[in-house]
Image: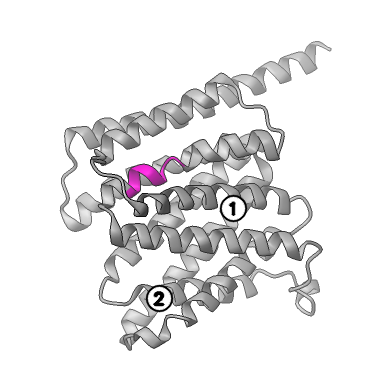
Amino acid sequence: MLSKNQLGFLYMFLSICAFSLMDLIVKWSVEYPIGQVLFFRGFFGVVFYFFIIPKNRLHNFYETKRPGLHFLRCFSGLIALVAIFIALRKLPLATVVSISFAAPIFTTIFSIFLLNEKVGIFRWMAVIVGFIGIIIITEPGISQLNIYYIFPIIFCLGLSYVAITIRQLSTTEPVWLISFYFSLAITLLSFLTIPKGWVMPSFNHFIILSLIGVFGGIANLWLSQSYKYSEVSLVTPLKYLALVFAIIFGYFIWGEIPTIKTLLGAFLVIISTLIIFRREIYKKKIITSKTIND
């Protein structure tokens, strides 16, 4: 029987797998405008959630006890999304990636002050080790600072606050409703890009693009489940594993051979997640032992 933190760990891992498949399709869909890809992500995410809404909530599925917090979750998520797009257009990719993966550090700090979570030395160690792995992989080279470097920081802050709001919302709101509203927000945002021109996809491409929304919807559902069952600062460092999947897909699909530095960084990423999981198993054994002895 898994503990709540271990269950959250598992949901986060499944979420990362689904997000990785979504990213795989997004990388393939380079001939379509970003706004149009966002539409498929948002709209078919909304469609997906209609299939998992409980039958007794179909007549009032949209009702929520905390509309203000839903708005903050969607708003901060969209701000993070826009910020990372601006950063990717104005800065080197490696620089943006290296800065954006500082998000777990912000999340850990936010969880202390906003959620009153206790963060021990082992979790701090896992965050630091994972971040060092990211630095090695991306090989950042910031030589000149300019105004655009603020956007990856905004992304980190937005993404971190999203994690906090999901944790707060999940105490009273169903996870499907949390994810539904964000998919709806993405869809509405994508409509603003129509004047810039969209491309009519073929039927086969339409099906493939729709999977972006399906995988994104499933991934967000599992992400919300993860934050519901586990502490934010515990499961967030596991997101580093997305880089491992990126290395595997890049090699087998696009023939991208990882460098020694990339492999070393990926090794550190795996070590960081193992530190967390092994620590949880150890803590569970201690608690179980005390219960039996008492």
Q: Which residue is painted at 68% across and 32% down in the image?
A: 117
SS under mark 2 = helix
In the image, taking residue 98 as reference, residue 276 lies left or right, namely: right
In magenta stretch: residue 137? no
Q: Which residue is mark 2?
A: 35
Q: Which residue is mark 1?
A: 162
Magenta segment's dominant SS is helix
Report the residue that reaches farthest toward the top: 293
SS under mark 1 = helix
Q: Which residue is painted at 49% across and 57% down in the image?
A: 80
Identify whether 123 is placed above or below 27: above
- Do the CB atoms of the residues marked 1 and 2 lie less than 8 Å apart? no
Residue 108 pos. (x, y %): 57, 35
Magenta segment boundaries in residue numbering: 96-102
What is the spatial separation of the Cα atoms under label 1 and label 2, in whole angstroms? Answer: 21 Å
Q: Amino acid at mark 2?
A: Gly
Q: Which residue is painted at 45% across and 56% down in the image?
A: 18
In the image, taking residue 243 as reference, residue 187 lies left or right, namely: right
Where, quadrant-wise, is the C terminus in this rendering? top right
Residue 283 pos. (x, y %): 64, 21
